[in-house]
Amino acid sequence: MNLIFLGAPGAGKGTAATKLSELLDIPHISTGDIFRTNISNGTELGKLADQYISKGNLVPDDVTIGMVKARLSEPECQKGFILDGFPRTLGQAEALDRFLAEDGRKIDRAIDIVLSEATLVERLTNRRVCVACKLSYNLKTHKIADNTCPVCGGSLIMRDDDNPQVIAARMVAYHKDTEPLIDYYVRSRRLVRVNSEEKIADTFANILTALEIRGIKI
Ligand code: AP5
Ligand code: MG
């Protein structure tokens, strides 16, 4: 299955994509994670991306499309993949369809995670990320002791772009550039919409139902 997660900042794309990738045994490709790894490693791509990400703006299409195209041409992506945070512009969506079609592939489903703006902002301000294993936690719903990751014991930090000013800019970019993609995938009959006002496990169950994946015990 070739899948895309759409949804505003903080919708829960990464949380759901991580679980689905384990379940389906296909790679989870988060463009935000790739950029952040490059920023921590001080690469040229990281230096460029940081100029945009730190302000809540989108990294230009020519950089992002080439990066995803290269990743999706790797052998492990031939059995299926889950894109999280890509495409985010109409140009990216059209380029993705074009280059997948070149080798007979296509996007099967785009999953839009739907929730109110108030919940999004609350999730972003309460998110803590493990520096070691990169898992995300919600301080309101996960039991966290001493700012330590319950899975690997690493330190939990706030993401640099999870401050009110940058969150506001990310929301503006989402409404302007990414929300129109909902219509793009509706028109090509690939969109499924999933409510995420509920707990993580319930949201995940909604996703499996929307994808018609049955008989899985969560
Ligand atoms: P990216 O890293 O993709 O950030 P984003 O889209 O803003 O989304 P987030 O990662 O903040 O949220 P999420 O939906 O993954 O939510 P999560 O699962 O963590 O991109 C960062 C930046 O990189 C962009 O701003 C842009 O500059 C650049 N970029 C990336 N891709 C690009 C592209 N294609 N083109 C151009 N630029 C690009 O969940 C959030 C929190 O909520 C967590 O704490 C989680 O534990 C919690 N949570 C999740 N689900 C639930 C639930 N059901 N109930 C309670 N808590 C929940
Ligand atoms: Mg994410």
Image: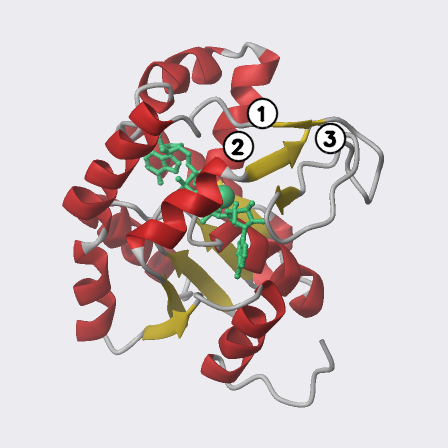
> What residue is rendered at 58% in x and 84% in y?
213
Hey, what amino acid is under mark 1?
Thr
In this view, the mark in front (2 or 3): 3
Residue drawn 56% across the image and 66% down it: 199
92 horizontally vs 86: left or right: left
The image quadrant that residue 189 belongs to is bottom left
Checking the image for residue 159, the label placed there is none
> In this figure, which residue is indicated by the disc labeled 2?
34
Asked whether, in this view, residue 90 is left or right of residue 50, the answer is left
Q: Amino acid at mark 3?
A: Asn
103 or 186: which is nearer to us?
A: 186
Relative image position of residue 206 (x, y in whole percent):
50, 77
The residue that label 1 is drawn on is 37
The local secondary structure at tag 1 comes to: helix
State the residue in front, 58 or 154. Answer: 154
The residue beneath circle 3 is 147
CB atoms of marks 1 and 2 within 8 Å? yes
Alpha carbon separation for disc pair 2 and 3: 24 Å
Is the CB of mark 3 within 8 Å of ligand 1?
no
Nearer the observer, 173 or 40: 173
Classed neighbour count for the residue bearing mark 2: other residues with Cα under 10 Å, few (<14), some (14–19), many (≥20): some
Label 2 C-beta lies within 8 Å of the nearest ligand 1 atom = no
Q: Amino acid at mark 2?
A: Ile
